[in-house]
Image (cartoon, rainbow, N blue to C red):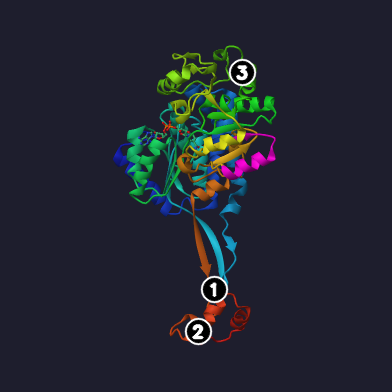
Amino acid sequence: MEELGQKLSFDAKRAMVNELRRSFEEGKTMGYEWRVAQLKAILRMMDEREADFMAALHSDLSKPYFESFLHEISLIRASCSLFLKQLKHWMKPVKVLAAITTYPSTAHIVSEPLGVVLVISTWNYPFMLSLEPVIGAIAAGNAVVLKPSEVAPATSAMFAKVFPEYVDNSCIRVVEGAIHETTALLKQRWDKIFYTGNSRVAKSIMTAAAKNLTPVILELGGKSPVVVDPNCDLKIVAKRIVVGKWGCNNGQACVCPDYIITTKSFAPRLVDALKSTLEGFYGKDPQQSKDLSRIVNSKHFARLTRLLDEDRVSGNVVHGGQRDEKQLFIAPTIVLNAPLDSPIMTEEIFGPLLPITTVDKVEDSFSVIKSRPKPLSAYLFTKNKKLEEKFVMTISAGGILINDTTLQVANPDLPFGGVGESGFGSYHGKFSFDAFSHKKGVLSRGFGGETPARYPPYTPWKQALLRNLINGSIITLILVLLGWPMA
Ligand code: NAD
């Protein structure tokens, strides 16, 4: 067998999946104790190797330590703690009402693990977005293979090196690699594939999964809009937009504000407030700030500068725009009124550029959002409760947050996932447990309570009785409960 957590040949991958499947079939992952032991091992790994992971995140993205701690390490710690607290309860069969049609009987829903699952992760939160689904998969009792993103190579290498030192390698493995390795992994048979990344690759994932009828969860992105109603507290709005955009990996987060919609008359005040907040947070020369991540690589740097340098966009930059290719740095940049069909307004930005689109009335923002693919997140700032209600009821999005940005991901009682082109399936907290479980309905009967009317010959008398029963006739029900023979 090749080394644990390394790049594997195709045959070695098949052997690895077979080995994991054997462990699963032997029931190794089923018990509460095994699941808890793995979750505790992950917590211990974080206690003992936090600094190494933080250094890897810094090497991959120049991610500020505060952000790595808050958005990656702390979220996973909180997640492990929640699972350790709730798992016993979540694993218990859930009793449901027995139907009169099956009287007498009891009914339960049993959460059973799916088998061997594959988690394919992405680069922007390479620690959190790898472990969050893995924790759910383990807690639900599955064997799991994690494929971290090659675009964050230091974090990927840390997982490959460190994870096997803590968790049970007969059931949990890390495989590093890029397209070639992922394609080979996708040729194996999985019981679920959990993919985080872009929608183009998601189509290949689904195609590969379809060969074995493997269910998938796709955590994708898109353009998350922020509607700003002039009826708001502008100072707070500016701080919450800036921290949700540039304070989240410098705009490289799936839930970051992608574009703002506000009214024509309010836009100048909003731009001024954003500019002064940016200066307050990152100084006059943001390149000197230690609190901004860098662009992940030169490919993404080129993609972002292409969006900015487009003819119809470059003249509309009202703030920022400075860049330094060697340092992979692009300053926080605001663009006012880029044409709605320009790439910056049609492609997901996933970086430090923030276009603002204007409309006559704030309500007009709804049709702008609805004319586009359903976003992963939609944000609204307003003091107007009626507008808030209308937004929640009419805008379809993975999730909605009113009067703030990005914080919805921090509530484990809310499902996190997309809709339409932003993906499908959800996770976090109990939703993760459910995402990696099969909900098995179990109906249990004894040998009493025979109802002769269900057996042939189907006489008109039996049919009439059953029809009455099914239509809810109380008298018939009482007669049947009293053992009235419906022969
Ligand atoms: P990426 O390049 O890291 O790719 C994601 C994974 O897919 C990697 O593990 C990679 O190895 C694999 N991959 C890449 N090309 C492949 C191919 N041709 N065949 C098989 N596997 C392949 O990440 P990315 O796609 O640049 O991620 C950015 C996107 O992810 C954005 O759209 C963002 O919005 C989205 N995203 C979504 C979430 C979420 O939770 N919904 C979180 C983060 C990022």
Query: Looking at the image, can residue 231 be seen?
Result: yes
- In the rendering, at what x and y percent does residue 46 appear? 56, 33
Pointer 3: what residue?
A: 275
Q: Horizontally, is 134 left or right of 241 in the view?
A: left
Please say whether residue 123 is visible from this viewpoint: no
Q: Say which of marks 1 and 3 sits in front.
A: 3
Q: Are marks 2 and 3 in contact (CB under 8 Å)?
A: no
Q: Nearer the viewer, mark 2 or mark 3?
A: 3
Magenta part, dominant SS: helix
SS assignment at label 3: helix
Query: Picture coordinates of residue 105 (x, y %)?
Result: 56, 72
Q: Earlier in the sequence, mark 1 or mark 2?
A: 1
Disc 1 to disc 3: CB gap under 8 Å: no
Quadrant for ligand 1? top left
Q: Which residue is drawn at the image coordinates 29% and 41% (left, top)?
A: 11
State which mark lies toward you, 1 or 2. 2
Q: Nearer the viewer, residue 273 or 459?
A: 273
Look at the image and give the residue range highlighted in magenta: 379-394
Of the pair 477 and 390, the residue shown nearer to us: 390
Q: Amino acid at mark 1?
A: Thr
| Vertical relation: 94 (above or below) 202 | below
User: How far apart in space, not on screen, are marks 1 and 3 (Cα)?
Assistant: 66 Å
Which quadrant of the view contains residue 361? top right
Q: CA distance from mark 2 to mark 3?
A: 79 Å
Residue at the spot 48% in from the left edge and 14% down from the top edge: 323
Q: Which mark is residue 462?
A: 2
204 and 107: which one is in front? 204
Q: Is residue 452 magenta?
A: no
Disc 1 residue crowd, few under 14, some 14–19, many 20+, Cα 10 Å:
few
Q: Position of residue 353 (x, y in %)?
A: 51, 23
Label 1: which residue?
Answer: 101
> Is the Cβ of the residue at disc 1 closer than 8 Å to that at disc 2?
no
